[in-house]
Amino acid sequence: GYGNIKGIKKGDHIQLECGRHHGIVEVADVRTYQTFAEMLEHEKAGHIVPDDPAGALNILRGIYPKEKEDLGVYVFQLKVIKKVIGN
């Protein structure tokens, strides 16, 4: 629930970049939860942590300390608008 995250709304377009890959996604939905545990009661863990759905809670808590989790948990459902591979 960082300030910049709280400002993202359904319908917004976001440019994502990872190495040579980049693209534009549309925010199809935004869902909020108080904790990671609450989120995992409603969201598919395999969509959050594909490599280890069973360990999702421990993985998330290993990345984000308690004071970050206390800011709230935001889940964005994304729709690819434009995908680009290469420069």
Image (spheres, rainbow, N blue to C red):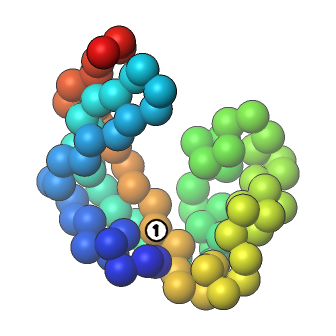
87 and 7: which one is in front? 87
Q: Which amino acid lies under the numbered mark 1 shown in the image of this protein?
A: Tyr
- Name the residue rendered at 63%, 79% in the picture: 69
Instruction: Measuring from the top left, give residue 3's x and y in whole percent.
Output: 36, 80
Where disc 1 sits, the SS reads strand
18 and 47: which one is in front? 18
The residue carrying pointer 1 sits among few (fewer than 14), some (14 to 19) or many (20 or more) residues within 10 Å by Cα, namely many
According to the picture, the residue beneath numbered tag 1 turns out to be: 74
Quarter holding residue 22: top left
Relative height, residue 36 to residue 54 (above, below) = below
Relative height, residue 2 to residue 87 (above, below) = below
Quarter holding residue 6: bottom left
**Hey, which residue is sitting farthest top in the picture?**
86
Visible residue check, residue 57: no
Instruction: Measuring from the top left, give residue 52's x and y in whole percent.
Output: 79, 40
Relative height, residue 4 to residue 17 (above, below) = below
Quarter of the image with the C terminus is top left
Visible residue check, residue 25: yes
